[in-house]
Image (cartoon, rainbow, N blue to C red):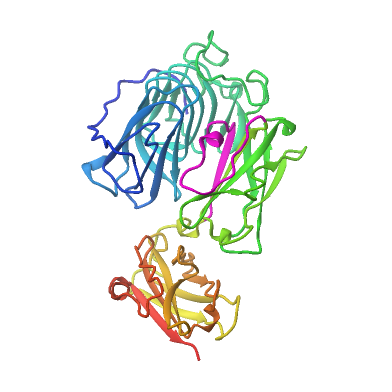
Amino acid sequence: MSMRGNRGEKGVGQVIPVAESLERRELLSATIDPNSQVFRFHDAVNTPVEVRLEGPGSGAITLANNVPTGANISAITLSGTNAQSALVISVDGSSTSVGEITIDGDIHNLWLRKVELTGNGVLVEGSLGSITLLSMTSSATASVAGAVGQLAVRKLSQANVITARSFPKYVVIEGHNVRTATMATNFQAATDVGSLASSGSQSGPSSTSPSGSQDDSEPATIVVDHDPVYGNSSDTTLTGQVNGVDPSQYEIAVVIQAPDGTYVSKPYLNDPVTAINSDGTFSCAIVTGGVDQFSSNVLIYLLPKSVTAPAFNGATSIPVAITANAVAEDDVNRNPLNASEPGLIDGPGTPTIAFTHVPTLGSWGDDLTGVVQHVDPSKDAVFVYIYVPGAGGWWGPKPLWAVPATAIQSNGTFNVDITTGGIDNTATWITALVLPINYAADDLSGSGSLPVDLSQNALAQTAIQRQ
């Protein structure tokens, strides 16, 4: 990887603005501003993506190929941003692709933790306080006219080119703090090759490190040591470590994304922050009630104690008071539906599904298990429904109404908790179907029969009556 050279001008595709404020819908393109800050869509591989602009500024998002959904972002253009602005791209999956991001001034934070830049990359015409990025293809570059305060990239190659007025003395590469002076042949400031010292007075976001010293200490980072197992109500506590700050001056704000997609502060509404121990470690209970064990994402923010972190439950986005003031952040994608590698289990063939263990009628806490063959676990999932004869008789999805899909492991096995409340233990019929992961299954709302479309669209299915 090298950090040098100049970057050519970037073309921006046609943008069709949307005048009204954005809601949960899928659009070809959209404007984002203080009144409509969130844009949600599905990318080319049907992964849910959310784009948020926090703080001052406005801009436009353009999807590729002129389709209303099922496409990646080709361009994001922002204007009017400043040192209090942040662009956050959240991905409910392993990654998404973005062609280019153009910003006409300063910006505090570019949170691209699960973004691969595939086109022209990033152009910032001012200074950049912090950027967190997954990766760049060989054709993508990053150019910052001013200083870069913090830089964290998961994957870099020798082909990548990053240009800035100056860089911090430490950067985070593949999770490791690296002193840029030791990478002088690869990291080059445009006006001070090799030494990376400031080329003069800086404007925009400060490059001062979170611990207070001028670029001379490690950058602030969060490392998660243990994330509770998805779906396990007995495994409750997230643990981790922070580096690069004075623990007595900072605290952790932990947020989970509930199965319905909303955000909840943890551990409790009356206690929305977690203390950092003197050695930098922290622990926070994220499973404290309801269906917390099925939260799809956990987001961790490092905040100065001078910032009052709000408590919230059922929020559609994370408050700006947290995201705009965080000096470091991390996220853990817990949904096993997003963890599978592509490929057919047991090779080509007719898809099949079979139960390997069925809990006894009347029992609690005993998972249903099974195995599937000749399906792709990165694209397909198991949908389980139970029939409860009481209360007039009704069908319902398991493990939850909000979580109807269960991941298929790489060896074809699956397990489902079918007794998550009420009188589930009295269910007399259990049906399992293999459907596309993002299949829009009807929640049934207590229906006495299963919708016909489930069987019509299933790759495989099985059922058993318990007596």
User: Exactly how many numbered labels are in the figure?
Assistant: 0
Up-down relation of residue 213 to residue 192 (above or below)? below
The percent coordinates of residue 84 (x first, y second) are: 50, 25
The reply to whether residue 119 is visible in this rendering is: no
Say if residue 402 shows up in the picture: yes
Q: Quadrant of residue 431?
A: bottom left
Residue 103, placed above or below residue 402: above
**Left or right of residue 167: residue 431:** left
Q: Residue at x 43, y 74 (%)?
A: 396
From the top left corner, tell me how far across and down residue 397 is, in percent: 44, 71
Q: Position of residue 242 (x, y in %)?
A: 67, 38
The magenta span reads: 306-334
Counting from the top left corner in percent of width and height, residue 199 is at: 53, 9
- Residue at position x 49%, y 65% in the image: 409
Q: Residue at x 56, y 63 (%)?
A: 231
Image position of 381 with respect to 105: above or below: below
Task: Pick out the residue farthest to the top.
Answer: 200
Q: Nearer the viewer, residue 86 or 172?
A: 86
Q: Is residue 119 left or right of residue 81?
A: left
Q: Residue furthest bottom?
A: 467
Q: Quadrant of residue 32?
A: top left
- Residue 331 in magenta stretch: yes
The front one of 467 and 91 is 467
In magenta stretch: residue 427 = no
